[in-house]
Amino acid sequence: MIHVLFPVHKRLNSKVIMRSLSDFSQPELERLKNKTIFFGHQSVGYNIIQGIQDIDSRMSLHLNIMETKNCNMVKTPVLAHAAIGQNKNPKSKIEEFKILIENGFWEKADIVLAKLCYVDIILESDVKEIFNYYCEVIDNLKSQFPVINVVHVTVPLCGLPFKIKGIVKQCIKRLIGYSSILRDNIVREQYNELLREKYSGKEPLFDLALYESLGPDGMQHYGFWKGQEFPVLVKSYTDDGGHLNKTGRRYVSEQLLITLLNLAGSK
């Protein structure tokens, strides 16, 4: 059948303690609106920003959300965000993030983060080269500007599309020779494991890939490829197999806000 692109199984991830924004008091929630954050991203990042806007509207967080690369536009606490670099060129994203921080966001922002996209890490990618470049750039920024607080972000995953159009698109890509999401997710997980090993428990880390693969019930979704197990994006979180739909962005964005809230409360 056309919808069976690869088998997926689930198991409980007992290492993850799930939290909800409802766990926070109103004074705790208001910590975010008093912080300036810069978030560099591309398309999945726009999904996350839209999810934050949805949550803000529902919970009246009163966040000031602005799309800008101009730090001079930042006059009051704000969640500033912008598309950085070019898709399929991860170094261009890391480089532009560096330039924006150097050009003034180091002074304006309390928290900064940059997210690569799933198209940036594929089967042909040199994972160690990209990871080493990211670490070198971030280490240099922290050396130049010790006040900056960087949140490291794992690379998002792909998975089974939720809608028929997305399923057909995935099948066509495989037929014409595009590398499959199975093999690409294996490589993405290699990159993400390097990030976790270096930063988890030592510096702020938002494990986007983990939350994308984790259902609200705590069950983590996995696929297999030639004996290798790898996490996949939860099917109900995406219509096309890569971008986050309303359900996915609401869930993932909440987890990012919780990460930022915890960081805002520690400063």
Image (spheres, rainbow, N blue to C red):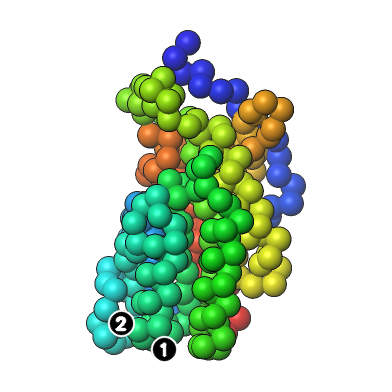
Between 207 and 267, the one nearer to me in the picture? 207
Provide residue 235's location: percent of width, then percent of height: 49, 33
Q: CA distance from mark 1 to mark 2?
A: 9 Å
Q: Is residue 206 above or below residue 238?
A: below
Between 90 and 249, the one nearer to me in the picture? 90
Query: Dot 1: what SS?
Result: helix
Provide residue 49's location: percent of width, then percent of height: 36, 59
Examine the image and state in which quarter residue 171 appears. top left
154 left or right, relative to 201: left
Number of numbered labels in the structure image: 2
- In the rendered image, which quarter contains the C terminus? bottom right
- Report the disc number at residue 107: 1
Examine the image and state in which quarter residue 97 appears. bottom left
Seen at 54% across and 74% down, the residue is 138
Amino acid type assigned to the residue bearing label 2 in the image: Cys
Residue 91 seen = yes
Q: Is residue 115 above or below residue 263?
A: above
Q: Is residue 38 above or below residue 196?
A: below
- Report the disc number at residue 71: 2
